Image (spheres, rainbow, N blue to C red):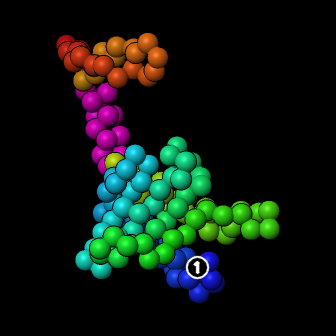
Amino acid sequence: MPDYKRNEMLKLLHRLLERSNDGLVPWQVVGDHSFGVQTAEARVVISSRDGNDRPPFDLYLYDPSGDELDWLESAWIDGRPSGWNETMQNLYFKAREIARDLENVISGFFESINYGRTVDIEPEPDGPASGATTSSPPA
């Protein structure tokens, strides 16, 4: 990627993280491990390339019709992580937090714990528990 293109994507990366931290970017889930935001002018998507919420991460910029304009990826340069890898990771997790509304989910979880509103979990034979039935709060 030419330096001038990388510089524009790095500006986008930093500004998105700054505005996301300020609560100004309404990220949405666009795939299992992809989060995006769209305006009339463009769409941006950040993804975990391997689909596991871990690096490497990819940031894509699309025009309104969905054509890819540019991208930036986590990278290694001369055997060392690029200077933007940490920023990309921070943006991914902030976008994930916003898109999945984790702050409210966690807050609601502890509110339920505080009032004894829990559910019984039925273990799955080959994975984490997911079935649930409501239990009564303590008297």
Residue 49 visible in image: yes
Q: Nearer the viewer, residue 39 or 93?
A: 39
Queried whether the magenta region covers residue 92, the answer comes back as no
Q: Nearer the viewer, residue 71 or 139?
A: 71
How far from the left and from the top, in percent, is residue 131? 30, 19
Q: What residue lies at 28% left-to-right and 19% top-to-bottom?
A: 132
Quadrant for residue 87, please give it: bottom right
Q: Could you say whether the residue bearing mark 1 is in a helix, strand or loop?
A: helix
Judge left or right: residue 127 versus residue 72: left
Q: Main secondary structure of the magenta part?
A: helix
Which of the image's four quarters has the N terminus?
bottom right
Queried whether the magenta region covers residue 109, the answer comes back as yes
Q: Which residue is mark 1?
A: 6
- Tell me the crowding category of disc 1: few under 14, some 14 to 19, or many 20 or more residues within 10 angstroms, Cα based: some
Amino acid type assigned to the residue bearing label 1 in the image: Arg
Vertically, is 101 above or below 87?
above
Which of the image's four quarters has the C terminus?
top left
Q: Nearer the viewer, residue 73 or 12?
A: 73
Q: Residue furthest bottom?
A: 4
Residue 137 visible in image: no
Q: What residue lies at 59% left-to-right and 55% top-to-bottom?
A: 56
How far from the left and from the top, in percent, is residue 12? 47, 76
How far from the left and from the top, in percent, is residue 5? 56, 83
Q: What residue lies at 77% left-to-right and 63% top-to-bottom?
A: 80
